[in-house]
Amino acid sequence: MKIAIGSDHAGYNYKEKIKTFLDDMGHDVHDYGTDSTDAADYPLFIRPVAEAVARGEADRGIVLGGSGNGEAMAANRVPGVRCALCWNQESARLARAHNDANMISLGERMMSEETALDIVRIWLETPFDGGRHERRIKQIDE
């Protein structure tokens, strides 16, 4: 799978750990920066990740910051992106299964490294339950 990844300075350390994790799993990872823990403005690195996903150049995208909130907001401004802010394993599973999230946002200051890697693994492994979602939409429309 082609995965785009980007972070600001506050998410840099986990970004580097996640890149290694993804490489070890055999994924093709494209890093959109930042390249250090020096202060950086997150939209400069998050928007290119979201645009790559929206254009189909990447199958999925992962963005990181201190809390992940601003990164999710910036990514979701790009049409075609469904970026879920994930804070635990269940939020990652539901983001895929119920929302077909093609991007996730993580907050390095909000979770352990182990939790962040679990979130990424679960999000990648969970299929979208499209039939269940379509039934819900039909019920709402009726």
Image: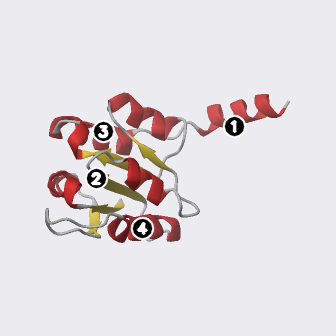
Observer-side mark, 2 or 1, equals 2
Observer-side mark, 3 or 1, equals 3
Distance of label 2 from label 1 (alpha carbons): 33 Å
Q: Is residue 137 left or right of residue 131?
A: right
Element class at badge 3: helix
Observer-side mark, 1 or 4, equals 4
Residue 125, x across and y down, in percent: 36, 41
Q: Look at the picture and state if 45 lies above or below 120.
A: below
Q: Earlier in the sequence, mark 2 or mark 4?
A: 4
Is the N terminus in the top left, top right, bottom left or bottom right quadrant? Answer: bottom left
Q: Residue at x 51, y 56 (%)?
A: 76
> Which circle marks residue 65 in the picture?
2
Q: Which residue is mark 1?
A: 134
Distance of label 4 from label 3 (alpha carbons): 21 Å
Q: Is residue 60 left or right of residue 65?
A: right
Observer-side mark, 4 or 3, equals 4
> Which circle marks residue 25 in the picture?
none
Q: Look at the picture and state if 14 lies above or below 138.
A: below
Q: Are marks 1 and 4 in contact (CB under 8 Å)?
A: no
